[in-house]
Image (cartoon, rainbow, N blue to C red):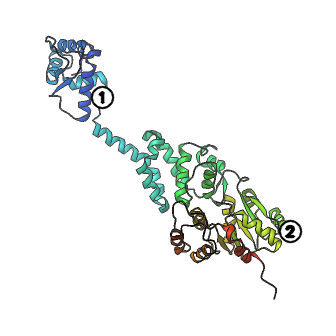
Amino acid sequence: MSPDITRLRRLLGGPDLAWLVERVRRRLETGQSLDDTVTRTAADDAERAAVAGLLGRAPRPGRSLSVSLSAVDQVLRASGASPDGLAAAVVALTGPVTPRREAADQLALAWQRAFAPLSDAVAVRPGLQDWYASLHAAGLVRRLARTPEEAAPLLATLARLLTRLPVSPPCSLSTFAAEHTGHAHALDQGPLATLTLDAIRALTGTPPGTGAQARRDTWAAAGLLLDEISSQVLTLNLPGDHDTATGRALTALGSVGQPAVLTLRQLIRDAPRPPRGGTAYVCENPAVVLAAADRLGPFSAPLICLQGQPSSAALHLLRRYADIGWTLHYHGDFDWGGIRIATRLLANVPWTPWHYTASDYRAALAKYPDTAALTGVPAATPWDLPLASALHEAGRRIEEELVLDQLLADLAPPPSP
């Protein structure tokens, strides 16, 4: 039978019995018995009077107030206010009660359904499975989207994007976002951008980082371009061609031994067309390019400079040359930062060491034993496994500037017979 809500509110719905109703509701949620006694410490006079009126007894003195739930149940049944007893009365006053275990199961199922599209997308991308597992463990999605209902469209869109990454040929981030989300600025910032960047790092091996440059590099690693102008690469004496404006510029600058700065826009929209097969040297620091331009000028071998972490423009240029059969020789600083730059480059472009092995490090160290101490977190050197151990053991850094003479000797033309 349905409760008499008017009588029920008069008996049990007053503010001085709200604590009792809340106690009973919590017991229903946790599956506890309603045959016990509940106690309210530090009850005030009004609360003691309300319990006495409900149970038909004189108020009892003292600060603590104990109430038999069985007695309340009997009163409610006998009065007709709630023929089905106390549990039905609390539901009538406060709304349906879902047991907490059932609610937890329902919530877990809702999250599982929200993640289902992303789970399907990751199942066919082995490179993302560790990332997907860590995404669950870290709870990032639950921090960005507080409920399964909020997360479901976000994860469905993310899954759709991941099936289309990386992009080749590269395109602008806004164009990609407009085409696949319906909004050109959907990936500028916010939860979707955060999750997509996180997945791209896992997919491409791009190192984590903060700031605009790190975001730009991460997007670019997946073929999505934020800015085609600011991403640049420094070169010297790259062979040009007569069919493109960029190629003609390279030819002109190379004829007088002047370095050239190429933007990502030039490399995408007006890429030079070098001859197939050849050799280029790649360095980390612009000091090598400046020294080669000063000492060797137009006679220097082709040289490409990363200027620190490889930019989108540098990676694009080096991939282009590698794809047409060029051999790339790389040298960087002998320190943990330089090692990480080299490792990232190797993950994107094949290269061979250019005086960048353990034996080269030890030779330079013998010549310059008092260099600055090596700092930072050690890293592996997959192109020459002993190098990492040599660095760790010696604990000294060797910068490219110290070995310029050796590098320039390789860049110089062979002596005339």
Give the side of residue 75 with respect to residue 390, left or right. left
Give the side of residue 104 with respect to residue 314, left or right. left
Can you give x and y, in whole percent of width and height, for residue 266 in the image? 76, 59
Name which residue lies at 64% across and 50% down: 173
The residue under label 2 is 256
Can you give x and y, in whole percent of width and height, for residue 412 in the image? 77, 77
What's the distance in space between the residues labelled 2 and 1, CA to CA?
84 Å
Name the image quarter holding residue 319: bottom right
Residue 240 in sight here:
no
Asked if residue 402 is positioned above or below residue 108 in the image, the reply reads: below
Q: Residues within 10 Å of mark 2 (few under 14, many from 20)?
A: few
Asked if residue 357 is positioned above or below residue 248 in the image, the reply reads: below
Name the image quarter holding residue 5: top left
The disc at residue 96 is: 1
Secondary structure of residue under mark 1: loop
Name which residue lies at 82% across and 70% down: 297
Q: Point out the tag, 2 or 1, that comes first from the N-terminus.
A: 1
Which of labels 2 and 1 is toward the front?
2
